[in-house]
Image (tube, helix red, strand yellow):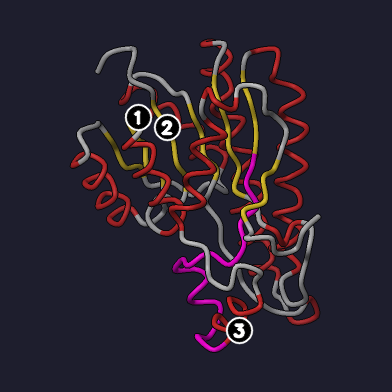
Amino acid sequence: MTDQVRVAVITGAAQGIGRATALRFARDGYSVAALDLQHEAAERVVGEVRALGVDGAAFAVDVGDSAAVNATIDRVVSTLGRLDVLVNNAGTHVPGEVADLSDESYHRTVNTILHGTFYCSRAVLPTMISQQSGSIVNVSSVWAWACAGGAAPYCMAKAGVVALTKSLAAEVGKHGIRVNGVGPYLVNTELHRSSHTQEARDAMAAGSPMGRECQPEEVAACIAFLASAEASWVSGETMAVSGASFLR
């Protein structure tokens, strides 16, 4: 691999938005590091990446484990040679009202979404600062600002991701690093399908101004734009990808 080949790291890359994003970056010529707890599924995504003519590697990691994240990012750089883009996409959701949620469910959600985004961002900064370039894109959610009952840990974690996006962008712009986010809604992913009945999904789609669900590839396109040189003067922003739902 030559120094000119850019490298994108995608967390939660085994399915949904993560898989779509990995394939989008591969089509854009990036080598792809697919990070996920589901290592076999991440390996399958890497197979799809390589079929597009670029390099790729899968890494099993719990993004809520800071030491594991640090070690994994070191392995990414040693394996693929550099690191240009980080997409913090790994997430989970345990529905339930606050009074009924266990500590384990709460910590699982917050550790994966908020702490994972922080740990992965912190881990890539030495490389990006050394290069004096880089782009981080964080996957938040419209629920960061709309919020909903029965999803307090998810909403608070996603809101924290928006705040981290702003704060980190203010810190690292001097190093040529941009930090942005996307806030999707109603995306046809495995997590969305497992969290809602088909009847509920149909009702949400019918109630959306565009009358349909979003596809993962549509979110991936926005992530790719924010990571690209075309968004060179965009930093600290979280773009709603919501089909005009929950306008701010």
Q: Give the residues in magenta.
A: 181-199
* Figure quadrant of residue 178: top right
Q: Position of residue 159 (x, y in %)?
A: 76, 52
Q: Which residue is mark 3?
A: 203
Q: Amino acid at mark 1?
A: Tyr
Q: Nearer the viewer, mark 1 or mark 2?
A: 1
Q: Residue 191: give x, y in percent of width and height.
A: 50, 68
Q: Choose the circle earlier in sequence order: 1 or 3.
A: 1
Frontmost of labels 1 and 3 is: 3
Q: Which residue is mark 1?
A: 30
- Residue at 71% over, 71% down: 151
Give residue 220's position: percent from left, percent from top. 47, 47
Q: Is residue 154 above or below residue 100?
A: above
Q: Earlier in the sequence, mark 1 or mark 2?
A: 2
Please tell me whether mark 2 sits on a helix, a strand or a loop.
strand
Q: Secondary structure at mark 3?
A: helix
- State whether residue 239 is above or below residue 128: below
Q: Amino acid at mark 3?
A: Ala
Are discs 1 and 2 less than 8 Å apart at CB?
Answer: yes
Q: Which residue is mark 2?
A: 8
Direction front: furthest residue: 210
- Kind of residue at disc 2: Ala
Viewer-nearest residue: 30 or 213: 213
First reached walking from the N terminus: tag 2 or tag 3 = 2
* Residue at left offset 60%, top offset 42%: 138
Does the segment drawn in magenta span residue 192? yes
Residue name at image x 46 percent, y 61 percent: 215
Is residue 81 highlighted in magenta?
A: no
